[in-house]
Each structure stands twice: as C-alpha cells, then as structure tokens.
Image: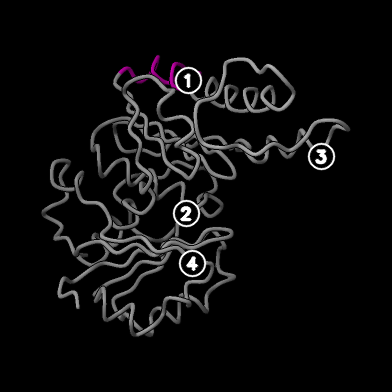
Amino acid sequence: MNSTKTDLVIDQGNSACKWAFFESTPKAKLDIAGYAGLDPMAVLYTHHPDELLTEETFDQFKPRAAIYSSVLNHSDDSKYEAIKQKIALCCRFDTTTTPIPIKNNYSQPAKLGADRLAAAVGAWTLAPGKSSFIVDLGTAITYDLLSAEGVYEGGNIAPGIFLRTKALHENTKALPLPEMPIGDFPEFGKDTVSAIKAGVLQGILHEINGYILQHQQNHPELLTFLTGGDLIYFVRKLKSGIFARPNLVLTGLHRILIDYVNS
C-alpha cells in the first residue's frame, strides 16, 4: 500500500478521461529546475471518471486534493460532484473564474477549451518568463501562443490526422481510408495509399514548421512544446528546440491545483 500523498488531476476529454496522480508538491518547489522533472506517478485512462471512484484507487494513491477539468462544459456536473464526495479539497477548472498564473487574452474566455489554457499554464510552469508555442496533436490540432510576459495570446484550430484522411475518403469516390501506423513516412508517395499518408503527414509537418518560423520572427527565443496523442508521428521530424511533453495539459492542471491549495 502506497503511503505517499498525491494530488489527483482529472482531464475529461470528448471521448476519454485521464486520471493522473502527482506526488503532492509544495508551492516552493515550483521553479523550472524543481518542477521540470516532476512527472505523474501514474496516468490511468477511462471513458468515465466514476469508473475509478473505487476504494482500491483511493487506498493505492491516497489523493489529498483534486482538480477536475472537462471539455464538456457543465454537462457532466454529476461526475465532478461524485469526485467531491471522495475528496473534500477539490476544485473544478473554469477558464473564466479559476485563478491561473498567466493572463488570458482570449476574447471569449468562456469558449476557450480548458485543455488549451491548461497546456499554456503547463508551458509557463516548465519555462516561466519564456515565450512558448504549444502544438497539441489530437483529433484536432491546436496551435497556441504564450508571450514571455505570461499572456495567452490565442491560437488556431485545424483538423488532425484522422480528420484529414477521413475527409479525403468521404468526399471523393476513389480514395481509401488508410491506416496510419507510427513510423517513418516518405516525402512523396509511390501509390495512392502512400500518397495520402505522405500528403497528410508531410502537410502537418510543414504546417507546424511554418508556424514556428513565423512566430520566431517576433519571438526569437520561442520555445515549442509538442503534446497530444499524435505527437509521436512528428517529434523526430521537427528541428531542434522542440520539447515533447505528452503530459503538458496534466502538468498545467497540477500547477493550477497547487495554487488553489495554497491560496
């Protein structure tokens, strides 16, 4: 049985949910040297948060505080209330009301995805005082910019790998829907399937590089953080100066929770 006290971070996405357990961290440790090496002790995946609301889970990890974040807005309030029944020191991440260590310059804060803002907080926690470009590669690809002054300046949303291949397949008569195995991909395809794979993956690769080059003109010391489930396709293809952080959203939510506990 684990005796280490933990912080529980719950990140509810559109189709799946992550439960991440971090070692409880005092606020004084939130410096780049101390926090950069602090990864989750464990990350559990489920389709419904309440699937893990068991005595076994709480006996194993002993969470003393929790934060709940969801892209489903308030359509899942019952899930949050069920978690609060287990952990009294619990907060829900709201992009408009929850205190965060950066300024949100989005014109419609209530409509900004919680995962996007949490990723920006994660970048700021790992590299405070640095301008950061955050690329989250999932079903959709989001591109977000954080200034060196700690201001979230906004970002863009584009279709991800699956959405691009699906659009080609569903809007043409002859193009197949290929599987996209992880691995190297050619610059140019030699047949229809490889042409789709190369076209989609090379297109995203050039898209990312184009954004980086554009923003480096205004932010010469720009850091680029890559996160999301599809980052593995691109991390070896991109130039140096790219930081792959699969748990960037979770890191940001943990930082927000630490601030909440110590407020």
**Chain-order first, disc 3 or disc 2:** 2
- Residue receiving disc 3: 170
Vertical relation: 30 (above or below) 131: below
Q: What is the C-alpha distance between the residues marked 3 and 2? A: 30 Å
Left or right, 88 with reference to 190: left
Q: Are marks 4 and 1 in contact (CB under 8 Å)?
A: no
Residue 11 location, quadrant = bottom left
Residue displayed at 26% across by 81% down:
59
Give the position of the N terminus as an image quadrant: bottom left
Query: Alpha carbon of mark 3 to alpha carbon of mark 4: how far?
Result: 30 Å
On the image, which quarter does residue 134 sit in? top left
Callout 3: SS: helix
Q: Which residue is mark 4?
A: 46
Badge 1, how many Cα within 10 Å: few under 14, some, many 20+?
some
Q: Is residue 87 above or below residue 165?
A: below
Amino acid carrying mark 3 in the image: Glu
Q: Which residues are magenta?
A: 210-220
Q: Amino acid at mark 2?
A: Ala
Q: Earlier in the sequence, mark 4 or mark 2?
A: 4
Q: CA distance from mark 2 to mark 1?
A: 25 Å
Q: Nearer the viewer, residue 3 or 215?
A: 3
